């Protein structure tokens, strides 16, 4: 058996990379060889804020002190921890089936170009029947934005609330419908970033 073909040794092991400068660890006072690359700050990604070279002990200390949520508000942390984080996308509804078709590749197969007339929001998302009904309760159509939804909601609450119309409770059911419609619409992804 020939020993001419020997596989090359790996230059990378658990994050260890060959440092072209063969410098020492960037941690103050450390003279160990720098074999591990880490971001210069745990608040900014390395490709943005730059890199530092550390020895094994100091890269372990850097990694153990890493906190993804550092500097975030409690609301931002809660949003990032939500099981739905990162899943907000436009969903198309073709003949009752909801799916994500960003290139509109299946639209020709399942319906005409105007199949969603009156059900497409200003952002291009197809609205479900419940969302269209909620808009109608507020006196709006699918082209409404979150700002126009809020304005319509406030105007209708002022109109139907018993405190605003001399204690007349005859519009109480209408007020409940308005509140329910607004609460539903403000959670719809098509209206979130308006």
Image (spheres, rainbow, N blue to C red):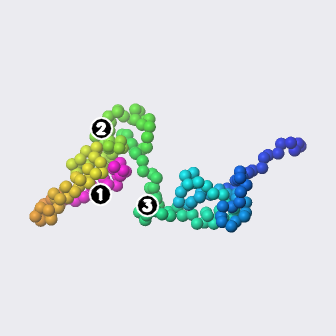
Residue at the (87%, 44%) spot, across then down: 3
Q: Which label belongs to residue 151?
A: none
Name the mark nearer the viewer: 3 or 1. Answer: 3
* Distance from Cα at disc 2 to Cα at disc 1: 24 Å
| Magenta region | 175-194
Residue at the (73%, 63%) spot, across then down: 32
Which residue appears farthest toward the front when viewing the image?
A: 29
Q: Hey, which quadrant is residue 50 in on the image? A: bottom right
Q: Which label belongs to residue 76?
A: 3
Q: How crowded is mark 1: few (under 14 residues within 10 Å), some or many (20 or more)?
A: few
Label 1 SS: helix
Of callouts 2 and 1, which one flags the residue occurring earlier in the amino acid sequence? 2
Of callouts 3 and 2, which one flags the residue occurring earlier in the amino acid sequence? 3
* Distance from Cα at disc 3 to Cα at disc 2: 36 Å
Residue 102: % across, % down: 43, 40
Q: In the shown orientation, is residue 33 left or right of residue 62?
A: right
Label 3 SS: helix
Residue at the (73%, 55%) spot, across then down: 22
Of callouts 3 and 1, which one flags the residue occurring earlier in the amino acid sequence? 3
* Distance from Cα at disc 3 to Cα at disc 1: 21 Å
- Check contact, mark 2 vs mark 1: CB within 8 A: no
Q: Which label belongs to residue 117?
A: 2
Q: Which label belongs to residue 183?
A: 1
Name the mark nearer the viewer: 3 or 2. Answer: 3
């Amino acid at each position: 058996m020939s020993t001419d073909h020997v596989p090359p040794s790996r230059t990378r092991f658990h994050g260890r990379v060959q440092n072209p400068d063969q410098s020492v660890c960037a941690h103050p006072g450390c003279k160990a060889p720098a074999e591990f690359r880490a971001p210069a700050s745990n608040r900014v990604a390395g490709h943005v804020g730059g890199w530092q070279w550390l020895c094994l002990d100091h890269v372990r200390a850097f990694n153990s002190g890493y906190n993804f949520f550092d500097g975030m508000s409690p609301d931002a942390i809660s949003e990032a921890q939500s099981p739905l984080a990162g899943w907000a996308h436009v969903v198309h509804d073709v003949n009752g089936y909801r799916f994500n078709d960003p290139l509109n590749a299946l639209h020709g197969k399942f319906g005409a170009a105007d199949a969603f007339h009156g059900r497409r929001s200003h952002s291009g998302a197809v609205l479900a029947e419940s969302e269209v009904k909620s808009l109608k309760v507020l006196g709006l159509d699918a082209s409404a934005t979150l700002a126009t939804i809020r304005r319509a909601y406030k105007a209708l609450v002022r109109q139907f609330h018993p405190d605003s119309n001399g204690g007349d409770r005859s519009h109480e059911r209408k007020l409940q419908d308005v509140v329910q419609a607004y609460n539903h619409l403000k959670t719809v992804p098509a209206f979130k970033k308006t």
